[in-house]
Amino acid sequence: MKGEKTMRSRLFKGVLMTVAVMLASVGSARAHEGCSTAILRGDYGFAITGEVLPPAPAPAVLEAGVAMDHFDGRGNITQSDFITLGGVAAVPNDEFRQGGTGTYTVNSDCTGSASISPAPGAQIEMKFVVVKEGGEILAVVSSLSPAPGVVVPARITARAVRVRPRLLR
């Protein structure tokens, strides 16, 4: 009798554990279903690092920069940025490049893509993941085109944080 009770107790605990694990995984899956294009709304500050890979035998050119992107929550982006290539500002007079525009989408699993034209004729394609409930974006450039019909290989990543305005006291 005692052995039978112990066996039932173990079986019952095993079933409870299995149910708990299943419920936890369902809850985890639902947490990722909450993303949509609307999760990105407001200003995000980007830190950009990587390298542009020109045709051999030319060496890779280091890229570093910052950008301020405004996401409207409906799939549109406006951008200003400051980029250096090989330590030299990409725009004359060391000023922020203004007027970049683009579009973006966010999937229910919090992955997404964006297409940004930072300057006339230039195009940047990105893939990204939205984290911290829309507070941050982790991105990689999937295609870099400085001019129509010209695609340059690159290894560029970016991390963005939502900019929160200071509260007035």
Image (tube, rainbow, N blue to C red):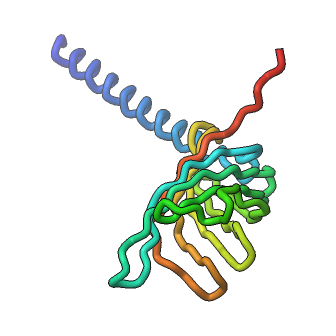
Quadrant containing the N terminus is top left
- Front-lying residue, 47 or 126: 47
Residue 80 vs 61, above or below: the answer is: above
Residue 23 point in image, percent of width and height: 49, 34
- For the question of whether residue 150 can be seen, the reply is yes
x 64%, y 45%: residue: 45
Q: Is residue 89 left or right of residue 20?
A: right
Q: Residue furthest right?
A: 168
Tell me if 45 is positioned left or right of 57 in this view: right
Image coords of residue 2 (percent x, y): 18, 11
> How far from the left and from the top, in percent, is residue 167?
79, 22
Residue located 49% across and 57% down the image = 157
**Residue with the most extreme top position:** 2
Name which residue lies at 16% across and 16% down: 3
**Res 30 visible:** no
Above/below status of 103 relative to 163: below
Direction from residue 4 to residue 158 in the image, left or right: right
Residue 128 in the image: state x and y as whole percent. 56, 56
* Foreground of the two, 37 or 91: 91
> Looking at this view, is 25 or 97 the one in front?
97
